[in-house]
Image (cartoon, grey):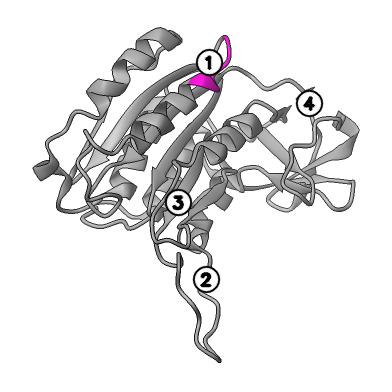
Amino acid sequence: VDVSVEDDNGRPVTNLRQGDFEILVDSAPRSIASFSPDNRALAVVMLVDVSASMSRVSLSDDDRFRRTLEAFIRELRTGDRATLGRISGGSMKTDALSGDSAALFRNVTDVLTVPDSDRFGPSPLWDALDQASEQVSREPGSRAVVLCTDARSTGNHLGMADVIDRATAGGVSIHIIIEDYSSGGLTLRRGQKKAPSPCARVAALTAATGGTCRVNSLEGNGYFNEPPIPEVRRVLDALHRRYTLGFQADPDGQTHALEVRVKRSGLRVRAPTRYLAGK
């Protein structure tokens, strides 16, 4: 089980030991059989949603997507394997995972080469996340999918519950960076309630898989001045600082509830909330 621990400010906590953790399976304590404070090498799919709801500017004129992908590549470490992908209209594109950063940089242009006409239509985020989770689940190491999107998911064949099932079965954590167009430059009227966080739309997904959600908010002038590079860095930093805990699973082929706790107060644990046992 890959586990992230954060302090009150959302910063990774890296000085914990095996005795600081507890594992419960179906609400019953389970002995921790193995523990490593060093995260395994990553196997990660990085997706950018380039559909028209994210930007109506031609991709040749909007460099935010390129800069986002390139920032992601720069955060990879030796031993990590990754692939880049896009969601454009009703289609998704990814290649095989690679540990060659130079090849990934060269692939950025190919990923972002898509006719503007293909960017209109549905944004099947759940279908894309399911496909990416299935792809990375075949890889060794600590598995994750990172998606940059506005979280407006339409035209899917699958639902969020299907994505959770796929990610759970494959041991994949899902991390979503949301470009929030809803609040920039807006003033709430008297008595108007504060709008819910955009992360509320995907909270069930990120919580169940031990993932995270971060928001790149719209600036007051009505435009995004910068791509979500700080959010990409925070996600990758947290992925590189996860603990790996092991326990003896029941070989019954069933899905079991999982809870990972830390004994120190004031810390937040991010870990999957269930797992699929092998036979």
Q: Earlier in the sequence, mark 1 or mark 2?
A: 1
Q: Residue furthest front?
A: 221
Tag 3: amino acid: Ile
* Residue under label 3: 178
Tag 4: amino acid: Ala
- Could you give the CA–CA distance between mark 3 and mark 4, rounded to whole angstroms? 37 Å
Q: Residue at x 49, y 52 (%)?
A: 205
Q: Main SS type for the magenta part?
A: loop
- Could you give the CA–CA distance between mark 2 and mark 4, rounded to whole angstroms? 41 Å
Q: Which residues are magenta?
A: 74-78
Tag 1: amino acid: Asp
* Residue under label 1: 80
Observer-nearest of 104 and 274:
104
Residue 76 located within the stretch drawn in magenta: yes
Q: Residue at x 33, y 34 (%)?
A: 63
Answer few, some or many: residues within 10 Å of disc 2's Cα (few below 14, many 20 plus, some between 14 and 19). Answer: few
- Could you give the CA–CA distance between mark 2 and mark 3, rounded to whole angstroms? 13 Å
- Could you give the CA–CA distance between mark 4 and mark 1, rounded to whole angstroms? 25 Å
Q: Earlier in the sequence, mark 2 or mark 4?
A: 4
Q: Earlier in the sequence, mark 3 or mark 4?
A: 4
Badge 2 marks a residue whose secondary structure is: loop
* Residue under label 2: 196
Q: Earlier in the sequence, mark 1 or mark 3?
A: 1
Badge 3 marks a residue whose secondary structure is: strand
* Residue under label 4: 33
Considering only vertical position in the picture, is 167 above or below 15? below
